[in-house]
């Protein structure tokens, strides 16, 4: 199946959760699925479906 991840198409297997797309260190990371923010507590249990649009944003320090 195919999802859009940060604006680009990506092929993934079925049964993939949001947490599977994230780095091990998730501090400062926010996720939106189809335009709605997904709370961190739901990253492990929110399964992705064909056609989903996922945006992952990481806060970065600096100026």
Image (spheres, grey):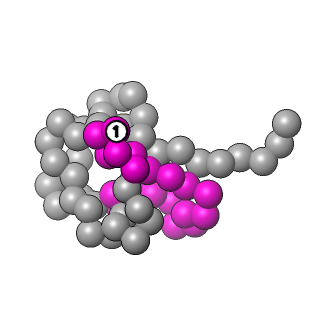
Q: Does the magenta stretch include residue 29?
A: yes
> Residue at 33% of width from left, 57% of height from top?
18
Is 31 inside the magenta-drawn segment? Answer: yes
Residue 3, placed above or below residue 27 = above
Seen from the viewer's position, the closer of residues 27 and 21 is 27
At horizontal 36% and vertical 28% (from top left) the residue drawn is 8
Q: Is residue 26 left or right of residue 60?
A: left
Q: Which residue lies furthest to the right in this view?
A: 63
> Would you say 61 lies left or right of 37 here?
right
Decide if residue 54 is on the left or right side of residue 63: left
Q: Is residue 40 above or below residue 63?
A: below
Q: Can residue 61 be seen in this view?
A: yes
Residue ID for mark 1: 35
Q: Position of residue 50 (x, y in %)?
A: 14, 42
Relative image position of residue 20 (x, y in whole percent): 35, 61
Pick the quarter of the image with the C terminus.
top right
Residue 19 visible? The answer is: no
Q: Is residue 12 above or below residue 6?
A: below
CA neighbours of label 1 inside 10 A, class few (<14), some (14 to 19), many (20+): few
SS at circle 1:
loop
Residue 2 spot, x, y in % from top left: 20, 37
Give the magenta part as a residue range: 18-37
Which quarter of the rendered picture does the N terminus lie within?
top left
Q: Nearer the viewer, residue 36 or 4?
A: 36
């Amino acid at each position: 199946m195919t999802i859009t991840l940060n604006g680009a198409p990506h092929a993934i297997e079925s049964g993939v959760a949001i947490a599977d797309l994230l780095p091990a260190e998730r501090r400062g990371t926010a996720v939106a699925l189809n335009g709605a923010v997904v709370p961190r507590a739901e990253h492990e249990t929110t399964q992705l479906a064909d056609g989903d649009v996922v945006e992952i944003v990481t806060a970065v320090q600096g100026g």
